[in-house]
Amino acid sequence: MLPIETNLNRIEKLSIQRENENFRFRSFLKGLDSRKVDRIVHRLHREITNQIDCLECGNCCHSLTPTVTSEEISHLAALENMDEETFEIQYLDIDQFQGSKFLKGLPCKYLNGKECTIYKDRPSDCHSYPHTHKWGFTRRTLSVISNYGICPIVFNILENLKIQLHYTDTPNK
Ligand code: SF4
Ligand code: SF4
């Protein structure tokens, strides 16, 4: 078992305290073999997701607004017995830069307590969050740092990655 932190308040505080350290670690990662980093991250992802119960957390559904594809919009509108246009006006926003559509409002309208009420039908963006099973970790480090204070899986992967890579932080470098 890896040492892990799951207290959301502590994770949020540590993310503020360690912001500069995380950006220095980000620079450190850029100099490494990205496939090697991915292999370590994927192993940590498996071990840490086995130790964390998302049903006891639900913080991503309180903090982030998932993008939805056209097919998902059709499907979600049908679940609500709405036409797509009405569903979009009522429940979606558009990212002005990327043009993508996402569920508006926090916490997510589909969250009940800590449970997703459309779990089997949730958008693929929710399904794949926090994306740490994907390849290309060193190319996504900005998003990793922004999720570090939100998601215990990301927090613990990054902290354990520092240990596995024998990273020593040097603040004045
Ligand atoms: S759709 Fe479900 S999993 Fe996705 S943000 Fe909403 S409550 Fe969370
Ligand atoms: S993915 Fe992360 S933030 Fe979302 S419920 Fe699981 S541990 Fe919490």
Image (cartoon, grey):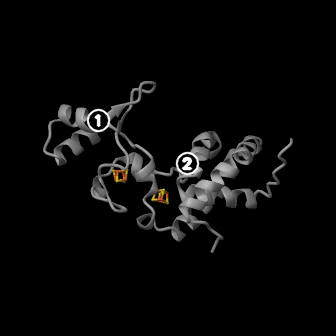
Residue 127: which numbered mark, if any? none
Question: What residue lies at 22% left-to-right and 44% top-to-bottom?
Answer: 75
Residue 70: which numbered mark, if any? 1
Indicate left or right for 55 with 118 as reference: right
Q: Is 51 drawn above or below residue 139 in the view shown?
A: below
**Which three-letter amino acid code belongs to the residue tagged 2?**
Asn
Question: What residue lies at 61% left-to-right and 56% top-to-bottom?
Answer: 155
**Marks 1 & 2, CB-CB < 8 Å contact:** no
Secondary element under disc 2, as helix, strand or loop, is helix
User: Which of the pair 100/36 is nearer the observer?
Assistant: 100
Tag 2 residue: 147
Q: Quadrant of the C terminus?
A: top right
What percent of the width, then of the height, locates residue 14? 65, 55
User: Which of the pair 126/114 is nearer the observer?
Assistant: 114
The tally of labels here is 2
Q: Quadrant of residue 118?
A: bottom left
What percent of the width, then of the height, locates residue 55? 41, 66
User: Which of the pair 25/127 is nearer the observer?
Assistant: 25
Q: Residues within 10 Å of mark 2 (few under 14, many from 20)?
A: many
What percent of the width, then of the height, locates residue 97? 46, 24
